[in-house]
Amino acid sequence: MDTLLKYVRGPVVLVILIVIARYLFPNKMTFLVEISTFSIYIMGNDILYGYMGMVSFGQPFYLGVGAYAAALYLAHVGHNPLVAMCLAILMGIVTGGLLGPALIRLRGDYFALINAATCAMGLFMVEKVMYPITRGDDGLWYRSRMHETPLLDLRSPEQFFWFAMIILVLILILYTWLDRSAIGATFRAIKVNETKMKFLGYDTFKIRWIGYTMMCVLAALAGSMYAVNYGFVNPSITEPARAAEVLVATLLGGAGSVFGPFCGTLAFLGIKDLVSTFVARWELAVGILTIFVCFRFTGGVWGTIETLGGKLSGRRKKALHGKGLIVEAGSSTRTKPGREVKP
């Protein structure tokens, strides 16, 4: 029970805070949904970059895989948004299974650039090659074809908000488990020293393949949520120029942490939303903030929050020691009345 609570507590508290913000700022509901969706997208990139140390400039391609899988189904085949999202997740698994063995053999700049090339090819495919079914730059419009879903009608922005909260809390719980699991530890070990991992007998190729496929699934899920929420998809979602947004949000939040993707998304989209109301080139403000964070706060927004929390906790314990309220005894900490407190 304690183990389950350890995984669930943080994600549930975060989602509760988002729900509170939804009622405090009713006109920002769409913005909160966008943050929730984009943070799932950033989690996928964080598995690659934060955990395994693999930089990719092709993330919009994987987002587009999920978005177009859902959009093509809703525009030409069926009417159920939930089925569309399931198909998008399946396409993410297929993409990871097919492209993974080829792409993850590459390292460093080669991996980053081959992903950028893949993204450019994906944009060309949806704009030109698949024009009869994707409508090219005109995009796909299908909101009127979507049917009501049970329990929550995903056509309604208010009810889609609650759906997004459910998806976010489930993904965060799984992400928390990943961070503390053996597979998460192997991801980090590969980033630190893959040669030693091979020496210890681990199949690092399969481990990187698993991480790459996880990234594809999360990006495809986020893409399908965009497609269902807006009822519209066009090739701009797969533009290679948008790859920088993913890396910037990952760095801002703090790479390789559970809540870093959400914090990075909140910082990135928050600045974009705020600055764009005053100036057209909001990218300048984001760029300056990114440079500042990279030089001054290496752990990003979430890493800084954790550091400050640790310092405050240390000061509190030091103050209690000074007042004689806490006495160290062996490996445990005891209060004066004798009640044992775990260190």
Image (tube, helix red, strand yellow):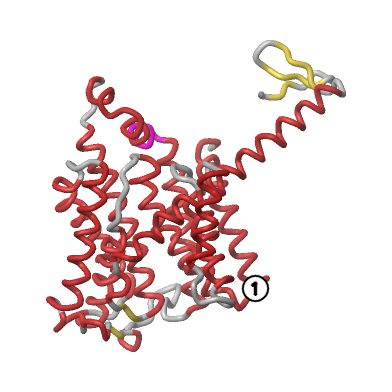
Q: Quadrant of residue 327?
A: top right
Q: Which is the main secondary structure of the residues drawn in magenta? A: helix
Q: Position of residue 261 (x, y in %)?
A: 47, 52
Q: Residue furthest bottom?
A: 144
Residue 18: % across, % down: 59, 62
Query: Total marks drawn?
Result: 1
Asked if residue 215 is positioned above or below residue 128 in the image, the reply reads: above
Residue at image location 84% in from the left, 19% down from the top: 336
Dot 1 falls on a residue whose secondary structure is loop
Q: Which residue is mark 1?
A: 25
Tell whether 256 sits left or right of 121.
right
- Magenta stretch contains residue 185: yes
Residue 126 in magenta stretch: no
Of 59 and 159, which appears nearest the observer? Answer: 59
Q: Quadrant of the C terminus?
A: top right
Nearest the viewer among 279 and 115 is 279
Quarter-wise, where is residue 129 in the image? bottom left
- Magenta-tinted stretch: 181-186
Q: Give the x, y percent position of residue 179.
A: 43, 39
Judge left or right: residue 333 versus residue 100: right
Q: Is residue 155 above or below residue 9?
A: below
212 on left or right of 51? left
| Left or right: 330 as drawn, with respect to 187 | right
Specify few, some or many for label 1: CA neighbours under 10 Å numbering under 14, 14-19, or 20 or more: few
Q: Position of residue 111 (x, y in %)?
A: 23, 47
As rendered, which of 60 and 285 lies closer to the eye? Answer: 285
What is the three-letter code of the residue carrying label 1?
Phe
Q: Residue at x 18, y 72 (%)?
A: 124
